[in-house]
Amino acid sequence: QVQLVESGGGLVQAGGSLRLSCTASGSIFSIRPMGWYRQAPGKQRELVATIASQGTTNYADSVKGRFTISRGNAKNAVSLQMNSLKPEDTAVYYCNIVVYGKDYWGQGTQVTVSS
């Protein structure tokens, strides 16, 4: 079983910054691909950023140059530094890890950007 714990969401004004963190635990025996996704009200969940086992990163066009995904100190921990936040970044952000082809999700953390 795999568990994901997220932290760091909150309310911020446009132009501000937030940092999300996520740690995975459970039956994970190597560094796995991880990522952040988000879901705004009335919209489908969408990819924000991913980081592969070897460190390759991938970003949605809407966040390139503003968000940075990185590995944490723990084996399967990941952070998302979000700068220059916009109201359209408002959403519930979910941490994801892929273990042996199966997706696991965190409980989600709310990010609200006021204009």
Image: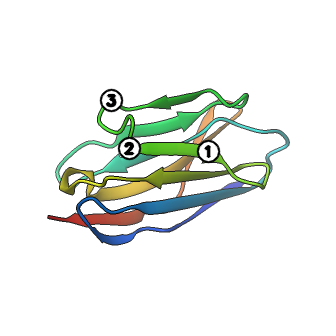
Estimate the spatial distance between the alpha carbons at disc 3 and disc 2, rounded to whole Å.
10 Å
Q: For the residue labelled by badge 3, is the local secondary structure a helix, a strand or a loop?
A: loop
Q: Which residue carries the number 3 mark?
A: 61
User: Crowding at label 1, few (<14), some or many (≥20) Cα neighbours within 10 Å?
Assistant: some
Residue at the image position 26 percent from the left and 42 percent from the top? 44
Evaluate whether residue 108 shows in this view: no
- At a point 73% along the width and 28% down the height, the residue shown is 54
Looking at the image, residue 18 sits to the left or right of residue 104; the answer is left
Across and down, in percent, residue 34 comes to 60, 41
Q: Nearer the viewer, mark 2 or mark 1?
A: 2
Of the pair 48 and 40, the residue shown nearer to us: 48
Is residue 17 shown left or right of residue 2? left
How many numbered badges does the structure rendering display?
A: 3
Q: Which mark is residue 70?
A: 1
- The residue type indicated by label 3 comes to Asp
Of badges 3 and 2, nearer the viewer stands 2
Task: Locate residue 70 relative to residue 108 in the image: left or right.
Answer: right
The amino acid sitting under disc 2 is Arg
Question: Which residue is found at the position 67% from the left and 58% from the top?
Answer: 23
